[in-house]
Amino acid sequence: MPKARRSSNNLTPRFSRANKPFWRRAIAPHPVRAAIAGLGLLFCGWLLVNLIALRSAAAGSVDAYLVLGGSIQREIHAAELAKQHPEIPILISTGSEDPCIWLIFQRDNAPMDRIWLEDCAQSTFGNFYFGMPILQQWDVRKVGLITSGSHLPRAMWLAQVLLGAHGIWVEPEIVSEQGVPGNQESWAKTGLDLGRSLVWAIASQFYQPECAGVRSLSSVDINRWRQEGFQCEHQGNLEASVPNPKSFLNVKNVF
């Protein structure tokens, strides 16, 4: 018996991709859309985990102090903290000359074995760029940020972006200043630093720089420095300990 021919009056139309409704084409699987969706889910998951970590860190105690260079007053404050909390490490990022910091801690009878100096940074952005990997090596979850009121809000915003991206909560320690600190602020500089900080917050998840200029304060050879001669910022009141003392403003971190 011959097979029945398909009726030409079939009421179930067959659509090609070209004549599918727009809403069905828009949600159809596509490699690019799938990749974007996957990255979006990964980012949201990372953000959620990071926010939980920050919330937990905020409730804890300070694990380390980060001193931003720009004024010897910040290092004087760090020496006081070292006496109060000798168990907490302190990282001084491009501060005063090594012997000046050494003399401050010696004068205040502050312990030096947990004080570390880093001189790779040449800007506020660099303070966090080079400081963040060191803090991570110390397994820091909450850091006390030592800076001046004149250095805000830029320093705090950069810290929250760059350190916060790695689950490190930032608690500011504002130091009173005399005169004009080395950090000069402007909205243009703040905007530029925030822009590159947002980019680096993502890039630093995959790459972290290393600073070869990291050393313990206790390793400073003060006798060699005395022979070579050095000058300290006059606000440190270290003239009696410095050969040929002069009123000299020694500030490296001026950007």
Image (cartoon, rainbow, N blue to C red):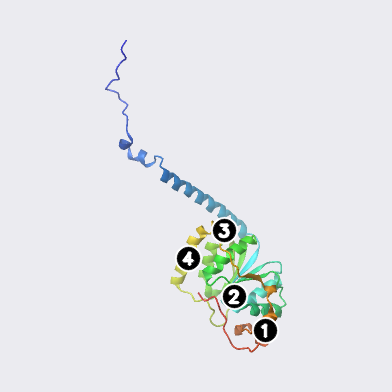
Give the alpha-carbon distance from disc 4 to disc 1, as whole Å.
Answer: 41 Å
State left or right for residue 80 relative to residue 164: right
- Residue 194 — which label? 4
Give the alpha-carbon distance from disc 1 to disc 2, as whole Å.
Answer: 19 Å
On screen, 31 above or below 83? Answer: above
**Mark 4 or mark 1: which is in front?**
1
Give whichever of discs 1 and 3 has the lower sequence position. 3
Q: Which residue is mark 1?
A: 226
**Mark 1 or mark 2: which is in front?**
1
Residue 65: x and y in percent read 63, 68
Question: Which element is circle 4 on?
Answer: helix
Q: Which residue is mark 2?
A: 95
Residue 84: x and y in percent read 70, 71
Give whichever of discs 3 and 4 has the lower sequence position. 3
Q: Amino acid at mark 2?
A: Gly
Q: Amino acid at mark 4?
A: Leu
Tags 1 and 2 in contact by the CB under 8 Å rule? no
For image coordinates 48% across by 46% down, the residue present is: 38
Give whichever of discs 3 and 2 has the lower sequence position. 2
Q: Amino acid at mark 1?
A: Arg
Give whichever of discs 4 and 1 has the lower sequence position. 4
Count residues near mark 1 (Cα–Cα under 10 Å), then give few for <14, some for 14-19, many for 20+: few
Residue 147: x and y in percent read 57, 73
Q: Which residue is mark 3?
A: 166
